[in-house]
Image: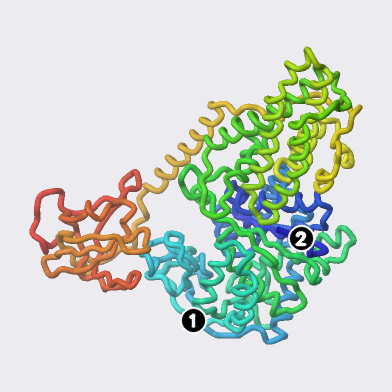
Amino acid sequence: MPEAHTHFARTTITAALPYTNGPIHIGHLAGVYVPADIYSRYLRLKHHPVLFVCGSDEHGVAIPMKAKKEGVSPQALIDKYHGIIKKSFADFGIAFDNYSRTSAQVHHQTASDFFKTLHGNDDFIEEVSEQLYDPEARQFLADRFVVGTCPKCGHTEAYGDQCENCGSSLNATDLIGPRSVISGAAPVLKNTRHWFLPLDRYEGFLKDWILEGHKEDWKPNVYGQCKSWIDDGLKPRAVTRDLDWGIPVPLEGAGGKVLYVWFDAPIGYISSTKEWAALEGQDWKPWWQSEDTRLLHFIGKDNIVFHCIIFPTMLKAHGGYILPDNVPANEFLNLEGQKLSTSRNWAVWLHEYLEEFPGMQDVLRYTLTANAPETKDNDFTWKDFQARNNNELVAILGNFVNRVTVLTHKYLDGQIAAPGTLTENDRVTLTEIREYPARIGNSLDRFRFREASQELMNLARLGNKYLADEEPWKVVKQAPQRAATILYVGLQVAAALAVLSEPFLPFTAQKLRAILNAEAADALPGWDAIASTEALLPEGHTIGETQLLFRKIEDSEIQAQLDKLEATKKSNAMSESQAAPQKDTITYDDFSKLDLRVGTILEAEKMPKAKKLIVMKVDTGIDTRTIVSGIAEHFQPEQLIGKQVTVLVNLAPRPLRGVESQGMILLAEDKDGKLVFVGPDGTPVANGSPIT
C-alpha cells in the first residue's frame, strides 16, 4: 500500500477537544490521544510537515452544571481542569504543536466570524419553536438541564439529548415526565427563536463525498455510522442555545443565546491553528485551505457524526476549507469489565497515574496501544497492564537491550568493533532490520496501531532470538572476533529500536539513545534511511552506560490499584443506595387513583435487539395484558414465569420499541443495586387482589 501522506504537501492532525468538566482518563488516551500522538511523531520522523493541534472544550451545559456542583464559577472550573489536562498531556508526552482553549479570544472571534459567514450566506434556517422552560428558575432548559424517562427504553434518568442507558439520541421534548435539573420543577413549553443548520440540503454532497468517496478507505465503524445517519434522512440541527455560558450569538437581538457547543467546538481546531501561527510567525491558511493538505481527525466513536457529517457540512457551507481525508475513530475502552464513568469516578485518571507510577509513561502508552479499541470495545485491566510490562517490555525489549549492551561493555569496553566475515544468519538479521520501517509504517498508514506496536516488539524479539542462537558469551572464549561481530549485529538491532520506538515509547527511545551514546538528532539514521544504511552504529563508536529501560511491576502495586477501585465501587454503592428525597406531598385522593393488583407472570421473553427489555404476559385477574420492563440485566425470562408480582394496572399504555406496555410492575433496588420484586412474600394470593 502506498504511503497516504506522500500524496500531500502537509498533514493537519486534530485530536478531539477534551471537555473541561474533569481530568483525562485512560479511555480518552486509548481512543484519541495516544494514536494521534503516535501518528504525528511517525510523520515527523519521516520529515513530513505535520501540525498537531488540540485544546480544551470549555463551553456547553455540562460546565455550569459541574461548576454549580463544585460550588465555583464556570470560569474557575474551566481554569482548574484546563490546567490539569494541559499539564497531564505534557507530562505524558503528548506532543501537540499547540494546545489551546475555546475560552480564548482567538476562538471566540473565529467561531463568531464563522457563524456570521454562514448567516450572511443564508445557510441557516431561523425558526421559532417550543422548548422546555423552567418556570421557577425562569430560564429555558438546554438538553442536559432536563432529565426524564426515555421513551425508547424506559430509563428514568435520561438526559434531554441522549439516554445513556440505551444510547438513543433524544430531544428534550421527547422525555416522559421531564423535570428541571436546576429546580426540580416540571418544565413548560415556551416559544423561543433559534438558528438551524439544514443538514438535509447537503445530503447529496455527503452521499457523494462519504458513501461513494470513502467507502474503501474509512474504517467500517466510521463509514457504517455515517451511512446509517444519511440513510435515515438528515434533518436541520440547531446551532444556537438558550444559555448564559458560551460564545454569544453575534447577531443583534440575540441576547441570552449562545452558539451550541457542537458548532463552536470543532472550530476550535481552526482557532488553535491560528493561535499557533501567531506564536510561530506562520501562515495558518495552508493547513486548512490548501488542497495539498491532508486533514485527519482522531476521535472516539461518540464523535463520529460531528466530525464526519456536521463539521464537514459547516466547512462546505462556509467554503474555502478542505474536508477531512480520514477520521480514524476508535471504539470505547472499559475498565475492569465496567464502562468508564467520570461521574462515578470509575476511571484511571492520567494525573493520578503519573504520580503513582513515576517515570512509567511509556508502560501505559504501550498497554493502551497494544490493547487499543480499534474495531470493538476493549477492556483495561491492571493485571494485563502488569503482564504487558513484565512479560513484554521488561522480558523482551528491555532484556534484549540490556544483554547486548552489557556484553559489549564486558567484552569490548563498550566499543563497537569492525565486523568480521558475516554468516548467513548475520546477513538475514541485518536484512530483516532494514524491512521494519516499512512494516511498521505500513500498519501506521492504515491506522492499525495495535499491529504496529507488535511489529516493533517483533524487532526486539528478532534481537533476542539472534543473541540466543549465536551465544556470544560462549563464542568469545574461542573466537573473540566472532563474538565482536555478533555484538555488532545485535547493536544494529538496538539502534533501529531507538529510532522506530520513538512514536510509541518516546521516553524509552530517548533513554535508549543515551545508552547507545546517540542522543544527537543526526547520530542515527532517520526512519526511512534505516532501510538503506549499511551500519546504523558504525565501528569505532563507543556506547554509553548501561541502564535498565523498564522495571518489573510488583503484585503489591497492582493490588493497591485494585483496592482503590474496590473502594470506589463500595462508595458508589453506598451513595446510590441512599434514599431519594421525598417527592411532593399528595392527598389521599391522589393515592386512591392508583390501582395496584396482584398478578402472575405467564410468559416472558427478551425483546429482540434490546439489551434491557423483557416482554411479559401477566394475568392481572382482570385480564391478561402485555407489560414491558427494563429488567433483563437482573432476571432471565425463565425465572419470571409463575412469579406473583404487584402491577399498577391503571397506568396509561405507552409504546416501547413498537410494543404497547399496558401497566407497570413494582420493583425496588437492594443495597447491591439488584432489582427485587415488591409484592406477595411467597404466600399465594388470588390474581386481581387489590393492594391496599
Q: Residue at x 77, y 40 (%)?
A: 431
Q: Name, please, the residue furthest toward the bottom.
A: 122
**Of residues 168 and 586, which is closer to you in this image?**
168
- Above or below residue 193? Residue 578 is above
Quarter of the C terminus within the rendering: bottom left
Q: Secondary structure at mark 2?
A: helix
Compared across the picture, whether 582 is left or right of 333 comes to left
Q: Nearer the viewer, mark 1 or mark 2?
A: 2
- Asked where in the image residue 266 lies, by quadrant, the reply is bottom right
Q: Which residue is mark 2?
A: 5
Q: Residue at x 68, y 87 (%)?
A: 122
Q: Secondary structure at mark 1?
A: strand
- Above or below residue 171? Residue 94 is above
Q: Residue at x 45, y 66 (%)?
A: 168
Amino acid marked by disc 1: Glu
Few, some or many C-alpha atoms within 10 Å of disc 2 (few <14, some 14-19, many ≥20)? some
Few, some or many C-alpha atoms within 10 Å of disc 1 (few <14, some 14-19, many ≥20)? few
Q: Which residue is mark 1?
A: 130
